[in-house]
Amino acid sequence: MFHSTAGVALLALVLFGCPQKAPQAPAPGTSTATPALHASSRSSSSENAKPVEPEKGAAPVASAFAERAAEREALVRESIQAEGVRDPRVLEAMRKVPRHRFVPPEYQPFAYEDRPLSIGHGQTISQPFIVAAMTAEAAPKPTDRCLEIGTGSGYQAAVLAELCERVFSIEYLPDVARFGAQNLSALGYTPGRVELRVGDGYRGWPEAAPFNVILVTAAPDHIPQPLLDQLAPGGRLVIPIGPEQGDQRLERWVRVAPGRSASAFRRQELMGVRFVPFLGEAGKKTR
Ligand code: SAH
């Protein structure tokens, strides 16, 4: 979690979780999501139930976890820890997961700078501090079942996989889903520790519910009710909420009682953030 002083400082900043454009390192595909991808994925009514096929022959690469370890250590010490994340299990997971394996080759040199990077199709891998802070706020336990909305590169899913029993992750854009699936497969997270699906995360993953942790890595303008419904007793939902260009805030919802009433949840605002817009059902309601 955050030290209280660091927490105050954080509130004054607009922090970038998954912005629409990667600063300093623009690349083809960072401007807007490809309309054709929206169209093809929206046109399928059963899109929420499609398994993602990883590329065949992607063998686990154990040595990848040893690559660039000193850079990860420096990132953890100088940025993530310094900015207020203290949970030792989360810091350990950030030290372990090789972020450079989750970005396109042209961005690998920047993988251990504390900033988001383009992964193409108008999407980004989140700033490492945001990944660590959201994970710490969700406080995953080794026995937990976790759901992520917005697989993207697969990096956040891998971090969760280090901390939970099982991770389920949903991505809306099929091409992005393939990229994430390849990255997770190459590092041995799939099959087994992470399950992937292409579809609209607004609906959650009812067959795998309830979840102890739900992390959302794109910003809808309101809380998707199905995600609240799929929170286990004591479960934590960490989600950015707000308009595409305007003020977004990171919120944590904890289920404290059964049911749908306001008193079933404890809601907390964490900090100002900037995430890519939530596509699909919730996105349509804003237009
Ligand atoms: N967690 C990712 C961050 C990716 S950016 C990582 O670690 O790299 C957010 C992702 O959310 C994008 O890939 C975007 O396509 C996806 N997304 C947006 N709306 C979605 C929705 N309704 N359902 C599932 N994924 C969605």
Image: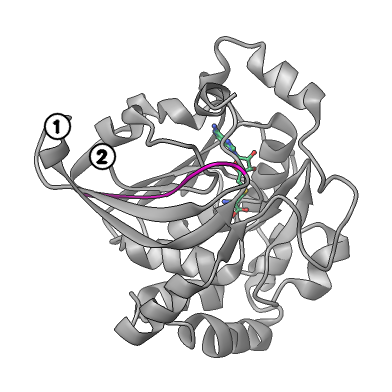
Secondary element type, mark 2:
strand
Secondary element type, mark 1:
loop
Residue 157 appears in the figure? yes
Label 2 with label 1: CB-CB less than 8 Å:
no
**The residue stretch that appears in magenta:** 235-244
Main secondary-structure element of the magenta-colored stretch:
strand
Which residue is label 1 attached to?
A: 261
Q: Dot 2: few (<14), some (14–19), or many (≥20) neighbours within 10 Å?
A: many
* Residue depicted at x 84% and y 65%: 25
Q: Inspect the magenta stretch and tell me whether residue 61 lies in it.
A: no
Q: Considering only vertical position in the picture, is 76 above or below 161?
A: below
**Location of residue 108 in the rendering, given as x and y in whole percent from the top left corner:** 80, 68
Locate the N terminus by quadrant: bottom left
* Dot 2 amino acid type: Leu
* Dot 1 amino acid type: Ser
Q: Dot 1: few (<14), some (14–19), or many (≥20) neighbours within 10 Å?
A: few
Left or right relative to 27: residue 271: left
166 vs 230, nearest the viewer:
230
Which residue is label 2 attached to?
A: 231
* Residue depicted at x 51% and y 22%: 285
Q: Considering only vertical position in the picture, is 123 above or below 163?
A: above
